[in-house]
Amino acid sequence: MMMGAYWTFLELFGQTIGSAEAMSYWLLGSLLASAVGSWIAGVVPVFRTRIVRDVSLLAAGISGAASYVTSDMLALGLTILANGFALFLFFPLYLGLAGARATEAMAIYLFGFAFGGVAGALIVSLGGYYLLAATILVTAFVALLR
């Protein structure tokens, strides 16, 4: 759910430690990393789907949280790449395991993404980027339990 918050505030946060130009290159890289993640999701053997899905969800949460606690543009960029890769690896596997409920799963995911942006605004205003990082990490672990 908090991935919406992650992507909503990423550019704003990135400009506090580097330039908008540097951020744009890292975001471009994240699109390429996302494409690779999606491609890999398409070739994951069926018997590995659940474990790869869970590991990619955890990787997205960890990289998302790490983004907001770094003070270095290189580290931020690498976490952005990791997050894009992990999310786009996770999402097709999440839908694939939903089977006949894929439409419902997609609706829940998109609701969570949008609501995450709204919740992120409140979280950043109350506790700043460190609280946002903690929330992103906690929600990844909660999602694993679901």
Image (tube, helix red, strand yellow):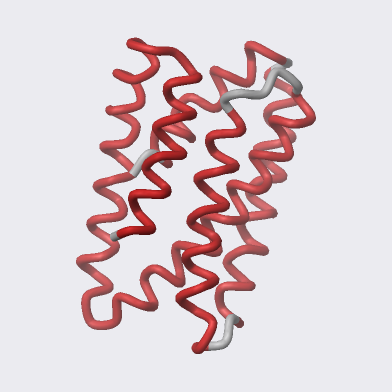
Asked if 127 appears above or below 141 in the picture, the reply is above
Find residue 9 and report its horizontal and vertical position in percent.
48, 24
Q: In this view, does 116 lie above or below 32?
A: above
Give the residue drawn at x 24%, y 47%.
111
Name the residue: 48% across, 56% down. Answer: 57
Q: How many labels does the image show?
A: 0
> Could you say where residue 134 lies in the image, as x and y percent from the top left?
45, 30
Please state the horizontal and vertical placement of residue 105, each as a whole percent of the image.
26, 65
Picture quadrant of residue 69 = top right
Question: Is 75 displayed left or right of 30 in the figure?
Answer: right
Q: For the view shown, which residue lies furthest in the right direction? A: 74
Quadrant where the C terminus is found in the figure: bottom left
From the viewer's perspective, tell me whether residue 76 is left or right of residue 50. right
Q: Which residue is drawn at 57% across and 52% down?
A: 59
Quadrant of the image containing the N terminus: top left
Front in this rendered view, residue 51 or 110: 51
Quadrant of residue 16 in the image? top right
| Relative horizontal placement of residue 83, taking residue 112 as reference (left or right) | right
| Residue 119 sits in quarter | top left
Indicate whether 122 appears above or below 90. above
Vertical placement of 132 versus 6: above or below? above
Q: What residue is rendered at 56% in x and 43% in y?
A: 62
The image shows residue 142 at horizontal and vertical percentages of: 34, 49
Residue 57 lies left or right of residue 111; in this view the side is right
